[in-house]
Amino acid sequence: MHDDPPRGLDRGLTHYGDTEFARFLRRSFALSMGHTREALARPVIGIAHPGGDFNNCHRHFPELVQAVRRGVLAAGGLPMEFPSISLGEPFLHPTSMMFRNLMSMDVEEMIRAQPMDAVVLVGGCDKTVPAQLMGALSAGCPAIQLVGGPMMTGRHRGERLGACTDCRRHWGRYRAGAIDAHEIGAIEGNLATTAGTCAVMGTASTMACVAEALGMMLPHTAAIPAVHADRLRAAEATGAQAVRLAREGLRPDAIVTGKSVDNALRVLLAISGSTNAVLHLTAIAGRLGLPVDAARLNRLSEETPVLVDLKPTGSHYMEDLYAAGGVQAILRELRDLLHLDCLTVTGRTVGELLDEQGDAWVDRAVIRPRAEPLKPEGGLLALSGSLAPNGALIKRAAADEALFEHTGRAVVFDTLEDMAERLDAEDLDVRPDDVLVLRNAGPLAAAMPEAGYIPIPAKLARQGVRDMVRISDARMSGTAYGTVVLHVSPEAAAGGPLALVRNGDLIRLSVARRAIDLLVDEAELERRRAAWTSARPAAQRGYRWLYQRHVMQAEHGCDFDFLRAPARPDDAGGGRQGDPA
């Protein structure tokens, strides 16, 4: 008889109608792999491995996973690697965002279906980490995140280059005629020269920092470069900690709480991270019924300055952030704004970890002191208004302050294809003070691609125009910059006001008022609304059919409605450590 709760290989036995036979057969097959009976009695640690030849960011994962296995074995566990979907950002059509929820389901179901006492989530490329965290939180198994780390910078004619902010900067120069095809070809070969994720504060690096701030990753590990020996040591330590999590039964819902989400938002704002992180953090928190709303983001943004001088907001790269002190140095700088009682995967609280660090050295050229921030307010801001009743986002730290209060004519592109066809046409009616509008690129219409960073029309780029107000229901890469209003909700395909905008309409952006408004009277909008029909494509089968019927709008993180948990009390309460919740 087995009265104790099942552990290790005894978890979740296959249904054969005979429990003891299921246990006998499983162990027989496990022994066929060459394991000893002693090994099979250990805690089983799953290692989720999203590698593959279509993911350049993850090409060093075999070595990384071996280091995790060493850590698991040394701590007395049995490592069991299993594959999952791999989302290589530049290799997926139409966009990796379409498949984030699919990967989360894959991770969740494989954690549930296979016998493991804890799981190590090995991720990196943009949508991978949020998908893994979403799946692990839903599964409820003890879990710990390990990221692959950022790539190192390359060199071109004495200049440091790092994907992908420098990609966009030099591509803009090429479009403007400032460099020729030979030059852009040489740059292409030097932008991404090692394994790892983008070398700047793009979505991958942002989500790594957010995961550490949430408490789901070992401290000091978010920013370690992919090819640094410390990355392998971090992997080994992560494997060992997974065994401890298994023995202690520490589950993710004890770590990810309203308070820890607040801490993660603080770090997101202080690093001026990717706007994508708001979508992902909303989806991650939503798996536990925790809210991330616009008012909360804006309140935290007013209190949290940008401290990290790193591209695309500043001038440094992720390898510099690691050398400067990493996420823990940022947390120390924000200490009085944090919930210090939040638990982490170490089993200790944020406050206890910071106490252990004391006055560790920090490179102030990269991580600024609170008294001398890079920007006095947080890098991101939520907007609302008549054009975005359910909200929108702007990365104000990467925008031109001269455009913060701006009214201009709308120049409308109806689809991604329309934009590609007309944007660089010499007869396009566009002026530098116009507002570029891209619609039908939201989650329902196009799976929300990173097309919101609308390029400056070629004829204006040749005139030296470097920024314009741009508005879209799409997303923007975290590596991009400019005065770009994104995630407009409801999207055009859902009948949002964005669908009603016409060329020549006046649009007003007011960062001070946190507003984006369409200056057209309501009677005219009602006439347009009556004539509007959705051009949303209808999938007939498979995952796209499921996606189109269940994906939610941006303010809900674009998760599937059937995967979000019911709302639960938010323990953050808007306060800080020591404040009454």
Image (cartoon, grey):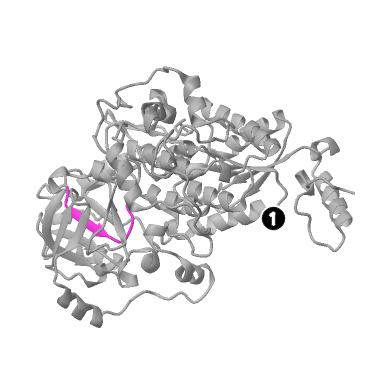
Main SS, magenta region, reads: loop
Q: Classify residue 408 by image quadrant.
A: bottom left
Asked whether 382 or 542 is in front, the reply is: 382
Along the horizontal axis of the image, is 338 left or right of 466?
right
One can see residue 182 in this view = no
Along the horizontal axis of the image, is 516 left or right of 38?
left
Q: Classify residue 314 by image quadrant.
A: top left
Mark 1 residue element: helix
Residue 258 coordinates in the image, percent (x, y): 46, 45
Residue 19 coordinates in the image, percent (x, y): 85, 57
Query: Residue 420: within the magenta?
Result: no
The residue under label 1 is which amino acid type?
A: Ala
Q: What stretch is highlighted in magenta?
A: 467-476
Q: Give the total number of marks visible in the rendering.
A: 1
Q: Residue 576, relative to residue 281: is it above or below?
A: above
Quarter containing the C terminus: top left
Residue drawn at x 27%, y 46% is 395
Query: Residue 468: within the magenta?
Result: yes
Asked whether 478 or 356 is in front, the reply is: 356
Write down the residue under mark 1.
113
Q: Classify residue 504 by image quadrant.
A: bottom left
